[in-house]
Every structure is written in C-alpha cells, then in structure tokens.
Image (tube, rainbow, N blue to C red):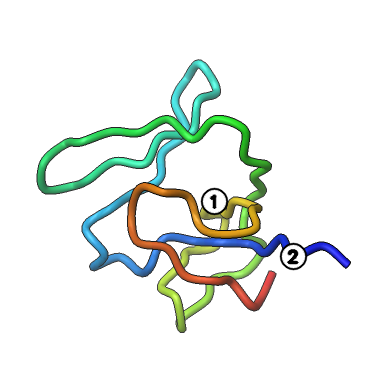
Amino acid sequence: MSREKWWVLAGPDSGWSLEQRANGDHVVVNTTTSEEHVLNGYQWMHVKHADAATGTPEHGLKVLGEGPPPFGRWTELHGT
C-alpha cells in the first residue's frame, strides 16, 4: 500500500500561497517575503470541495507525496 497522501497549504493564514503559472508551473509563494519555489515532480489535482478544516477553497490545488513539499506550511487533506 502506498504511503503517499494529498497535501494542501495549511490555511489562508499560513503565509504561503500555491499558484499555477501560465507556463504550467506550480509555485509556492511566501506572501510576506515573495520567496518562490517551483514544485517539480509532484502530481497535483484541483480540490473538489472546499475544506473548512484546512481552509482550502473549492478548486484549490492539492499535491501528492509521501510527505509534504519542503517549502511552505502543509497539512494532510482528508477530504476530496
């Protein structure tokens, strides 16, 4: 059984946002310092339903991995 899980940014107050750029890159951005990190090698999907527990909006992005990406503050997504 795979140990991969879906991860989302840890709420709107985490200080980080996940953006999809016009070239298709998914970039984690620190909203305070403008620090940016491209997420290479992660499978991603849009979140189907908003999740109040994590603060994830409907159609937000989630990424799949055995652990969270090394940049930003992430939490495990239990919904869809």
The residue most toward the right is 1
The quadrant of the image that shows the C terminus is bottom right
Question: Does residue 46 lie above or below 76 as drawn?
Answer: above
Residue lying at 23% horizontally and 68% vertically, measured from the top left: 13
**In the drawing, what numbered circle is on residue 3?**
2
Q: Quadrant of residue 6?
A: bottom right
Residue lying at 59% horizontally and 51% vertically, measured from the top left: 63
Q: Amino acid under label 1?
A: Leu
Q: Looking at the picture, how far across and down is residue 78, in whole percent?
A: 64, 78
Q: Looking at the picture, how far across and down is residue 52, in whole percent?
A: 46, 81
Q: How many other residues sit within 10 Å of disc 1, few (<14), some (14-19) or many (≥20)?
A: many
SS of the residue under disc 2: loop
Q: Nearer the viewer, residue 59 or 15?
A: 15
Q: Amino acid under label 2?
A: Arg
SS of the residue under disc 1: strand
Image position of 17 (left or right of 46): left
Q: Which residue is mark 1?
A: 61
